[in-house]
Amino acid sequence: MNRKPLIIAAIILSTLLLYQGHNQNQKTAIIIDPINEESRFKTRSTNLLRDNGYKVTYISGKEVTVKLLKNLPKDHDIYIFRVHSTCINNRTWIFSGEKYQTESHSLMQLADLVHKARPSLTSAYYFAVSPELIQQYNKDSFTNSLILMMGCKGLTTNDMANAFCLEGASTYVSWDGNVCLDHTDQTYIALLEALCTEKSSITDAVNQAYTKIGADPVYSSVIKAYTIDT
């Protein structure tokens, strides 16, 4: 009996099982960036994550719709939101990349789940989404996930942080006030370097990033970490 085909089949099966196991254990990160697809942050962050074993998904520009934010891909290890955000009536709102139209998302507008907002007085209006939308439509979607919210005022109040943490996120990181785009880019790159290269805990990584880059030079806002027990 020729045992060679059996040996080859066993080798192929073992390789497939090993590949499957590797994929199941692979860490994943998703970067949501309606601001600017081509940026130094994109290049540096994706390289850092991939070099340290993460499979990275990058969603940018007009692809960052209200529909996407209603149905975020589930259970990534790291979510990075390179977004504009703001605080309206003491509630935190995340900007999409979808331009505002009066007739769009009418029921959610009536329910105050989405709102029109603009990142500056001279810019167009975009749809922004509320903490209630994130929580209502993304049930149990962030099991032990790290949420890195790069926009302004992500931790002026705790409502957006709570929305993510109540649906499973372990930690939410953001700013306690306004922040310049270049400053948040530098700070979160420093944070990712500490997490990925130096294998720091998230608390230590936040502290290291703040020590290295400092408070925002214009608004004096500070990066902070929030957990459900904070």
Image (cartoon, rainbow, N blue to C red):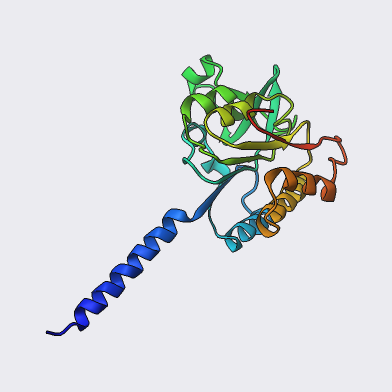
Image-quadrant location for residue 229 = top right
Camera-side residue of 23 and 11: 11
**Is 194 left, or right, of 31 in this rendering?**
right
| Residue 187 visible somewhere in the drawing | yes
Q: Quadrant of the C terminus?
A: top right
Q: Position of residue 8 (x, y in %)?
A: 26, 78
Q: Position of residue 217 (x, y in %)?
A: 88, 41
Image height check: is 200 above or below 67? below
Q: Quadrant of the N terminus?
A: bottom left
**Is 68 left, or right, of 82 in this rendering?**
left
| Residue 100 visible somewhere in the drawing | no
**Is 105 left, or right, of 86 in this rendering?**
left
Question: Going 71% across and 24% down the picture, which residue do you hit?
Answer: 157
Question: Going 64% across and 59% down the picture, which residue do you hit?
Answer: 48
Image height check: is 189 above or below 32? below
Camera-side residue of 99 and 87: 87
Image-quadrant location for residue 100 = top right
